[in-house]
Image: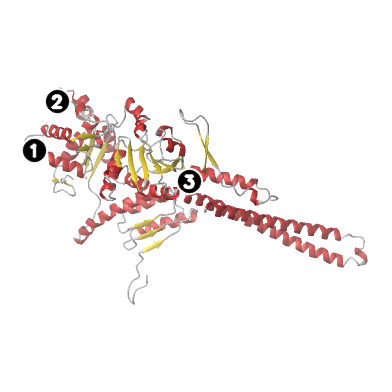
Amino acid sequence: MIGQSGETSVLKRLVVTVKSDDVWKGIWKDLLSCLRENTSLTHLDLSSSELHEEMFRDLMGLLQVNLTMEEIDVSHTSWHKDGKAAQIQESLKQNEKRAVYMAVLREAKLTFGDAKAGRLFLCGSPRAGKTKLRQTLMRIVQGKSWLGNKWDELWRTRGIEVEFLQNNDKGSIVYIRNLDYIIINPNWLTNILLGELVALGQDFQAQESGSSDKTMSPNSYTSKNGFVSESVFARLVEEFLRKQPREQKGVDREMLENILINLDLCFKLEDTSQYFIPSFIPEHASMEEQNYQQGAHVESMAWRTRSKTSLFVGIRILCQDGRTMSLTAAFFPCFQMFMRRKLISEMHVSKENVTCSRHYLGLFLDGHQIYVQQGTSHKYVDVLMLCSKHKSREGALKYLVKHVVQELISFCASPKGCPGVALVLGVIQTLCVEMLIPCHLRGAILIEELKSEFICSIKDKLEDIPLDKSHLEKEEELFNYEHGWPPIQGHTTEVVFERARDLLWESDVEVVVNEIQDKQMQQLESLRQASNKVKNDLDHIYLANENMVSDSNLPHMKDSNPTSFISQASTSVDTCSGVENKIDQILQMFHANNECLHV
């Protein structure tokens, strides 16, 4: 930026196109190292760059210390679809909030040092190993020894483990936004209130205490789907307050309800007078519940406006590493509440067009009927759509990605979701979407895997194209790769084929075409250069032979036959010209198919 005389130029926006070669690795590291101390650059444009996993970790590390960055553009990259873009945006949002109070501290000219304290939360299902993990972490962090501590050996948690890590104990407080509450005893909030809530939800109080003096059984107020009535919620709170010491005053039902709602531990559905408490959902479903998940609930799902010409779209959002990653039992219900609140309050969608069920979220949006359904293994979520008859498939797909898929990915990256769980996208067999096949039987394939199959198919076909045939014969079948879906148990008995270009999005097909085209252009250009070189060499030989003919009248050349050399050279030149013509045909064929795909 060029300012007036005497002003210092300040860089606010930087556009970088990163490549995947080794040279860029060092440049990328140096760039991020410089940006750690940056206080001026606010916009970083990485669109159309070749980005990978290690670079993502580097960037997220930068955002831990750089609060100046406001926008990072990763459009037209692999990060845009695999959930990394959403994690970046969530980190930028958090930094925006941090920057506000950090500015106040800086204005007060306070000195910043290393963190002195932290609070470790470990939440999970019963007997998951929270206590052992806490003890192991504490031995590593502080060198504490828990051997000989009989209390720790006998005592087990009530749903939540909390350890306050501090080098001196100066105390701490908890302030809850949107409320006028300041909690001066964090252990009351974590161990007592939240721990009791998780314990009730997981329904293992009775196993721990074995006491029979309880006025109500846990089974009388817990719920398989996390929903309880207003009367049951009131009884639950009263039961909690009854257990508290008499000297503890000022805590009532309204206060507890406000705390739980503002911490997103409880949601109140005003139109049904119900409360939704995610911790009441069992982490591990019973066999009866699993059978219900695997198909019985599909009976309540139905396409309301389908016709013979209806278009269907299915997207699977799944954990990148299904072996080490999974979504929590409460993730999908919490996402349901998040979407319900967002659609009704922000997008002004009618309540009748938003249906929350135990295993799916039903939506009617912009003429589309949509089901968002969690997988039985907590490792994926399916998004199914019956497209509006007034919109194209590609337009409907873009709408679905923007308003549902990206919202789910962003929610997962947020503190309220499952931060750290990387998500990737796949496509679902169209027949499975149309027939509403149970989720565990649906055919699905990762988009990147399907693109790879598509590319390999095109390469094989290009290798099989002979140079002596018309390019018109291969135009239609070059990009007609069909993916085979295996039979669906209880629904189909044969393999079903579906064109890759009908499953992929236009942008993905364009990526495939461009990648193949670039490689073919390079190979054909190399062939053309080699052909030209041979042609030039033969031209020299042809001229040399002509000179030999002109000299054939000389006495010492009369016994030679130079015309044979001229004939051979002429034939070779004609052959090279033919090769060039065939190269042009292949290029024309590729461009013709490329244009056909975009019609």
Q: What is the C-alpha distance between the residues marked 2 and 1? A: 21 Å
Q: Identify the disc placed on residue 248.
A: 1
Question: Quick one: 65 or 591, which is closer to the camera?
Answer: 591
Give the left or right position of residue 130, taking residue 108 as reference.
right
10 Å neighbourhood of mark 1: few (<14), some, or many (≥20)?
few
Which residue is tagged 2?
214
Give the structural element (helix, strand or loop) at label 3.
Answer: loop
Image point 49% across, 42% down: which residue?
449
Quadrant occupied by the N terminus = bottom left
Are the residues flagged by discs 2 and 1 in contact, CB closer than 8 Å?
no
Amino acid carrying mark 2 in the image: Lys
Amino acid carrying mark 1 in the image: Gln
Which residue is tagged 3?
504
Q: What is the C-alpha distance between the residues marked 1 and 3? A: 61 Å
Question: Quick one: 223 or 353, which is closer to the camera?
Answer: 353
- Could you tell me if residue 429 is visible in this image? no
Give the structural element (helix, strand or loop) at label 2.
Answer: loop
Instruction: Tell me where residue 293 appears, x and y as whole percent.
Output: 35, 31
Question: Quick one: 212 or 474, which is closer to the camera?
Answer: 474
